[in-house]
Structures are given as C-alpha cells and as structure tokens.
Amino acid sequence: MILEAISLGLSTGTYCTMNCAPVLIPFLSGTEKASYKRNTGLIGAFLGGRLLMYFILGAVFAGLGLLMNEFMDPVLARRLSVYAYFFCGAALLINSLGVRFPWGCGRPSTGGECSCKVKRFCRLGNDWVTAIFCGLSVGLHVCPPLWTAMTRSVFGGGGPAGFFYFFFFYVGTLPFFIPLFGIPFIAKRSHAIKRIARITQFCISLYFIIFLGLIPMFF
C-alpha cells in the first residue's frame, strides 16, 4: 500500500510543480535575506500549509459524502481552483506591497522599522505568513490523483492506514521540489535577479487575482 501511495505521488508530481512553481520561484528568489536555512524553512512552511489543506479537504469531502463518487465534480474543482488563485494572488500581492515591494518599499536588509508607507502590509505580508497562506491556497487545487489518494485513504482501510497512505502519497510528490533548495545559490549572487523576481511576483499576483480569480468568479 505504501509503495502504491508513493508511486501515485511520483507519477503526478509534475502536476504539483505546475501549480506551485509560479508561486514559489519568484517568491523565494526575491526574499530580502537569501540563505539556505531560511529558504528551507519557507519551503517547509509552504508545503506544510499545502498538506494541511489536503487534510482539511479530505475531512470535509468525507463528511459530505463526496468521496463516494468515483470522480470529482469538475464544476466544484474549477470553483475551488478559482478561490485558490484569488487567495494565493492576494497573499503574494500583500507580500510584494508590504515586505519587499519591487521599487524600494520594504524592510531594510539590516532589520529595523518597516519603510513601507502602509505599515500593516509589513505584518500581513511577512514571508512566513505568505508561505503558509500560499500553501493553504494552492492546496485547493484538487487534481484527479489527489482525489484518488483521498478516496483510497478513506475507503482503503481507514484510520491510521488511510492517514499513512495519504502521507506517503504526499511524500511521493516532494522530490520535484528539490531544485527549489538551490535558489539561494543563484539569488545571493545577483541583485538584478532579486529585483526581477519581485516584479514577477507582483505581476503574477495581479494575474492570479484578476484573470484567474475575479473574472472566472463573476463572469
């Protein structure tokens, strides 16, 4: 069962990276204090938030009886993805506006008072809060393999066996995130990369909010 769970995760890990890479790469590349320890912590916070959301969705779907269906309702999946893009985009936008806005607004690299005119953004846009919240938001993307893992974990034995099945499915997706741990090696060597990453994050946040969030939500 464990081998099946890990294999399912490994075979679908590229789907996870398609949802996570546009969020994590500019976010991690543009952080003020680029270090391997901090980078690892932020990746862990993001992945932890994502895993927590998966458990929440699994509990809710099981409680509503939705896991009795072989396939997930595509309309529900699309709606959850819209919310995922909107909330993730909002977190990235607040982070870019508060802690490290591309055009000079943010915390000095040596610490001290926030130099942003909107002081609340400095707290709301904290890197750690952003990483966790983005992880929770990205977790709302429910793909067919995730739905399969949820179903197998609930009806394939239940209890501890179901928990471990889903956990090892998640473990199977993690190797695709290994390249992210090398981001500080590049980011620390070029200030231009940081600036480009910050501007990219700002643009992606607007794209998520407007084109993948608000427009599909209301139109």
Image (cartoon, grey):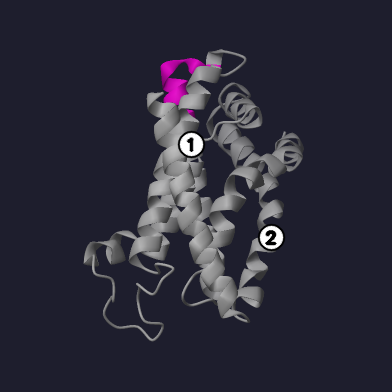
Q: Where does the N terminus fall, quadrant-wise?
A: top right
* Residue annotated with mark 1: 212
Name the residue type under label 1: Leu
User: The disc labelled 2 sits on which kind of residue?
Assistant: Ile
Residue 108 can be seen in this image: yes
**Furthest residue to the bottom?**
110
Q: Residue furthest top?
A: 69
What residue appears at the point 47 percent right and 43 percent down from the top-left corner? Answer: 208
Q: Nearer the viewer, residue 70 or 219?
A: 219
Question: Toward which corner of the image does residue 2 lie, by quadrant?
Answer: top right
Measure how far apart labels 2 and 1 are at the Cα level.
27 Å
Q: Residue at x 66, y 40 (%)?
A: 169
Q: Is residue 71 above or below residue 95?
A: above
**Residue at image mark 2:** 178
Please indicate, yes or no, whether residue 36 appears anywhere in the rendered image.
no
Decide: is 50 above or below 80. Answer: below
Q: Position of residue 106 (x, y in %)?
A: 35, 73
For mark 1, give the secondary structure.
helix
Q: Is residue 195 left or right of residue 17?
A: left
Q: Label 1: how many residues lie within 10 Å, few (<14), some (14-19) or many (20+)?
A: some
